[in-house]
Amino acid sequence: MTAVVLGLAVGTWLLAIGLFGSVLATVLLGYEYATGDQSFLRVSKAAASAAAGSLVIALLYLTSQFLSEDYMNAYVWDNTANYLPTLYKVTGVYASNAGSVLLWAMLTAVVVTTTLLLDRYSARGARLSQSLGMGVVTVFAWMLVNESPFTPLSTRYPSVAANGIPQDGSGLNPLLVDPFMAIHPPITFSAYALMVVPFTVGVTHFVARLQGTQSVFDDWLGSMTRWLRGSWLLLTAAITLGGIWAYRVLGWGGFWSWDPVETSVLIPWLGLTAVLHTLNQYRRSGRYAVLAPAATAALLPLVIYATTVVRSGVFRSVHSFAGGGIGSGVLFLLGTTSTLAVGPAFVHWFRTEQSDTEAAGLLDRATIYHAAVLGFILLAFVSLWGLTFPVVRSLASGVEVSVDARYYNLWSFPVVVGMLLAGGMYAQQERFSTRVTVGTAAAVLVAALAVGVALARPEWQLASTEPFDPAYYRAIGSLSVVTVLPPAVYFAGAWVVRYVGRLRRLTGRRAKLNETGIALIHVGAALLIVSVSFVYVFSTTASVGIVGATELDDTGERIVRDVEGSPYTVEVTNYSPENTPTITAAAMTPAEAGAVDTASSVILVKGEVTAVQRFEETTIAQLNGSRVWVGADSGTVQFEEGSVIVARGSLSDPRSENIDALVYTNGDNVGPVSAPPTNAYTPRVVEHQYDVQLYRGDTLVADGTVAEQSYRGRDMQTNDPLIKRGITGDTYVVGTRTAGGLSIEISRYPLANQIWFGVAVMLVGMGLVFLFDPASGAAGGRRD
């Protein structure tokens, strides 16, 4: 017990060191920027390194507590359990607020400290940037000290700790028991951490401009571009993994539903994509001298807003897993970073009245580029307003309102179509005249509208509308989703033609790879947009109830049902409930039981009876010749030497020279391994499996197993669907147990695999640009 307390104290001290080091580094770096005095630079580096190092060690130490099942730590007890494999014990580390903040703080501290330790980031203006970065780490560390992941169980849950050290944890949210969700948070927070330094450089730029001093924005431009491209890669991968998780685990086959958490993470992704476009133009032509640094600074507030949506508990979402609310720290960080991002930029713009668009003609490439960038900003605003308005309305009036998918679809769709046209025009105008480009785009727009009107069937519309809806809703909603196809083809074709033309003129290998990456990003985006639109509208679902299906066994009995409203016939056989693990697998050996702290209240143990002793009112049995015995009231239990038993009972220290631990039980909780007591153990997870064959006419469409898991103590179920993948789409089968039997739901998702292919093409493209951009690629690019 003393060692456990000391261990938790070690974790608390590590967090305290992280807070002290980050505060000291923040203050000293700010002082060095204000005065130009570099005499404390070594101390600043040491303090930042100590902060980063302590947070790294704290995260590793917390992870070790999860792996060792240290249930005296309240955070560990609350987020893991014995039945979980090692991967999902690690997942529990960042399953709730405190652990996820520790992960984010550690990654941020490492990124900021790296810029401080590298000599190339040594200009005076860099000190303000580094001070702001360490200030962000300070807020995180303060949050961790106030809501520590090293709080003792006796402090957080005294009623649980009153019974001694628990032998099992409360468990992980079942929806997180998935390999995609195991890696999704670390990738997401890595992407977020890479945005911190660009935020600080953007703020520092405008502070320097207002003071009339030299900005470090241009000096750090190449590095920021690399970091932000890396962040884009990670964030895109994280969103994709989240989509795959929703597709597999939630059981309804959808990978996007405009859920608040899905929508919130889209906002920083759109902002990041817009920033990369502005930085590209700023580097090449000097345009966006105000917008590029301002948008760069705005990324971190968008990230923190997305985190607020996920972790606050205010927004209802199937993806929200951290309980207890987010606390005041992140809200403070949201307000502070928003003020720093907007305030200096606005004052500078107001004083200089500088315009990023004043030299652009109406239809030249610069104006078209502005339109594309504006499209990203509009899409981000549509999502931001859709999330924020219901909360603001509820706080202001007490009236709860909701924003459904219609809002997002009907406002986003025309923006996306406009962006496809603008992007295609930008690529086409590199090789063709403005007149030809405008004529081509106009023809594509006419074709899109003609197709949209001609194919405006109710089942092909992006969203249903009502007669009393605004005229805008009725106009956009009446168009067919196929409207997006001509602009997408035009967009992809224009970028392919541009790529072919450029490839002929380029000679360097790195330049060719960079151009290949640019083309792949845009072609992949077009494929993704079309696939998502078509899947969203053209997916179909039908279901059938099978009464008595839970009575099936492995005798080969088969139930056949026609699925009403669809061409499918479903056959179900081999129902198999599997308790995982069984009582004998879950029970401890005597050696394991002997190592348990005797303050623990109840354990499950198994072993061979090797000796029996009887007293006046008690009989005890030795297990496996060890110093662990099982005891019971005489007359209620008869122990026989040589029998193998399993027993559940209270663990105590009998204070005997020959007995280390005594498990005291009764007749209901002890029995032979061949027929163990039914009430002694209830598995944490019970899995129900069914073999399913799905036919379309006489053709076998899908054949496999569907499963549903039920979790004790959480009243939750998860599903393992049967997914038959194909070139034209996925056939998706999920089974759910009902009071009367089994419900089978069959869904068809056309072009589902083209979504993942489109994302993969985009990721490969950005990977090539990240590595081989001649100006700021990671493989031999300009170093600054």
Image (cartoon, rainbow, N blue to C red):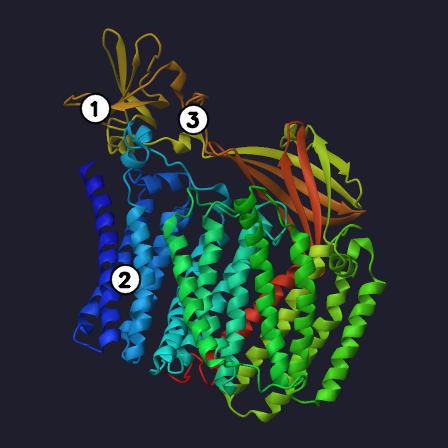
Disc 3 marks which residue? 681
Type of amino acid under label 2: Ala
State how far apart marks 2 and 3 are (Cα).
45 Å
Q: Is residue 664 visible?
A: yes
Most extreme residue toward the front is 351
On the rendered structure, is 269 left or right of 468? Answer: left
Give coordinates of residue 377: x percent, y percent. 57, 68
318 or 779, which lies in front?
318
Disc 3 packing (10 Å; few <14; some 14–19; many ≥20): some
The answer to which of marks 1 and 2 sits earlier in the sequence is: 2
Q: Which mark is residue 52?
A: 2
393 or 104, which lies in front?
393
Vertical position of residue 468 compared to residue 77: above or below: below
270 or 336, which lies in front?
336
Disc 1 marks which residue? 653
Disc 1 packing (10 Å; few <14; some 14–19; many ≥20): few
Say which quarter of the image contains residue 777.
bottom left
Type of amino acid under label 3: Tyr
Most extreme residue toward the right is 454
**Viewer-nearest of discs 2 and 3:** 2
189 or 393, which lies in front?
393
